[in-house]
Image: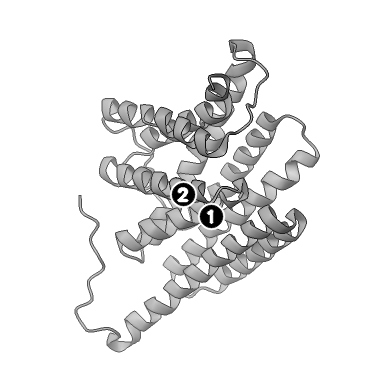
Amino acid sequence: MSFNKVQNPGGPFPGGLDRCRFSESLGWWLYAGGLAAAEIVVGYVDPVAGVLIHAGLLVVLLVHAAHAARRQRHLLYLVLTIAPLIRILSLAIPMVLISPSLTYLVTGLTVLVAAGPVVRVGGFTPGEIGLRWGFWPVQLLVGLSGIPVGIAEYYLLRSEPLVDALHWGEVLLPALVLLVCTGFVEEFVFRGMMFRAARRYASRWHALIYVNVVFAVLHITHLVPLDVFFVFLVGVYFTVVVVRTRSLFGVALAHGLANIMLYIVWPFFV
């Protein structure tokens, strides 16, 4: 399946249609730039100031979505609100909860609850956002590709393990939390809802690049610029897989396994 561009039979700005598309596209990228700026402030300047910027973006996106004239614009801005919400939750919840696993759990479940109304407003069908099994051997193979992804990212981040020891009693619950609340939830949001919302208005290439830029900039707070680029490439790979297989489950498994290797398993082997 090729990533076809939006056709433009009438020249660069026929009847104002493409000028309008250009203006809206510029707005999308301004929001992406705002997210990146907020993440830079969180990671390199002051987390409180960064969260305030994210909160401002959240409010502006909600207002913009409420005033958007066309359904596609309304929907994309609404889905984009989940990006600053993820960062706000991830920084606010540790003040109350001690366990990192519980932080991931509460953040993931809250994001999933917030995504529910967006699915209803967008009129997404399960098949449209990849909630179908597809050909399971292919999904399993895609899922297993998350293991080398997680190992590679560990060498970029050198992350501390989420558990004290590598045995079932310590590992099982954190692994399930990472599998569901980072693997499935994040793929549902980015490769499911956000990509499909962008795709309703933009070309596949534009939607693919945009969604994965937003996904990647949320990793700026790891303070490893090369990791941001790595995550962008992984996100592109995941998106292409979802487009070709029409299923989220393989990439959700891959995403979850990558984080399990990154935060639980591989730190004990190096």
**Residue 217's disc number:** 1
Spot occupied by residue 17 in the image (x, y as percentages of width and height):
33, 82
Query: Is 72 situated above or below 195?
Result: below
Mark 1 vs 2, N-terminal side: 2
Name the image quarter holding residue 209: bottom left
Q: What element carries label 2?
A: helix
Quarter of the image where the C terminus is located: top right
The residue depicted at 37 percent of the width and 49 percent of the height is 236
**Residue 112's disc number:** none
Which residue type does callout 2 highlight? Phe
Which residue type does callout 1 highlight? Val
Q: Residues within 10 Å of mark 2 (few under 14, many from 20)?
A: many
Spot occupied by residue 113 in the image (x, y as percentages of width and height):
60, 44
Observer-nearest of 15 and 266 = 266
Going by the image, does 213 lie left or right of 97?
Answer: left
Name the image quarter holding residue 159: top right
The residue depicted at 31 percent of the width and 42 percent of the height is 241
Q: What separation in Å lies between label 1 and label 2 (alpha carbons)?
A: 13 Å
The residue depicted at 58 percent of the width and 52 percent of the height is 220
Colouring = one colour
- For label 2, the residue is 190
